[in-house]
């Protein structure tokens, strides 16, 4: 009888822990969804005029070097 009570108490604690972890994960997901970051690393601040180059700007900066076709 004592073993049955111990197993029931253990199962109840496991279920309570699973429910708590599930709720914490849902709360964390809601906090992440509330933030909209425009850059992959928002802590890096670029000075004016030094934003990400566009594909056309990258192509115009490329120079041919060597004679390889």
Image: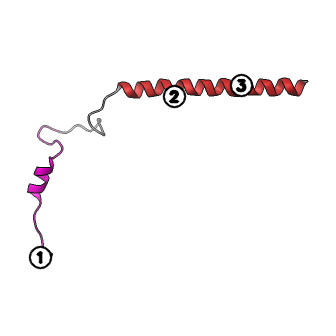
Residue 69, percent from left and from top: 14, 74
Q: Please name the residue that numbered disc 3 is placed on.
A: 13
Q: Residues within 10 Å of mark 1 (few under 14, many from 20)?
A: few
What residue is pinned by disc 2?
A: 25
Q: Mark 3 touching mark 2, by CB under 8 A?
A: no
- Disc 2 crowd rating (10 Å Cα; few below 14, some 14-19, many 20+) is few
Q: Residue furthest right?
A: 1
The label on residue 55 is none
The answer to which of marks 3 and 2 sits earlier in the sequence is: 3
Nearer-the-camera pick, 56 or 46: 56
Q: Image point 81% across, 28% down: which residue?
A: 7
Please check the rendered image and state whether residue 62 is part of the magenta-colored stretch, yes or no.
yes
**What is the distance, in whole Å, between disc 3 and disc 2 at their CAs?**
18 Å
- Give the percent coordinates (x, y) of residue 45: 23, 37
Q: What secondary structure is found at the residue carrying circle 3?
A: helix
- The residue tagged with tag 2: helix, strand or loop? helix
Q: Is residue 33 left or right of residue 50?
A: right
Q: Main secondary structure of the magenta part?
A: loop
Quadrant in the picture for residue 35: top left
Instruction: Give SS at disc 1.
Output: loop
**Quadrant of the image for the N terminus?**
top right
Location of residue 21 (image quadrant): top right
- Residue 67 is labelled as 1
Q: Which picture quadrant has residue 17?
A: top right
Q: Is residue 35 magenta?
A: no
Residue 52, given in percent of the width and then of the height, sits at 18, 44
Tell me if label 2 and label 1 are in contact, CB under 8 Å.
no
The local crowd at label 3, few if under 14, some if 14 to 19, many if 20 or more residues have their Cα within 10 Å, is few
């Amino acid at each position: 009888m004592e073993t049955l009570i111990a197993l029931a108490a253990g199962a109840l604690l496991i279920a309570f822990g699973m429910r708590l972890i599930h709720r914490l994960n849902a709360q964390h997901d809601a906090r992440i969804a509330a933030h909209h970051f425009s850059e992959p690393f928002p802590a890096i601040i670029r000075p004016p005029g030094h934003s990400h180059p566009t594909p056309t700007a990258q192509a115009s900066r490329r120079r041919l070097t060597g004679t390889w076709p």
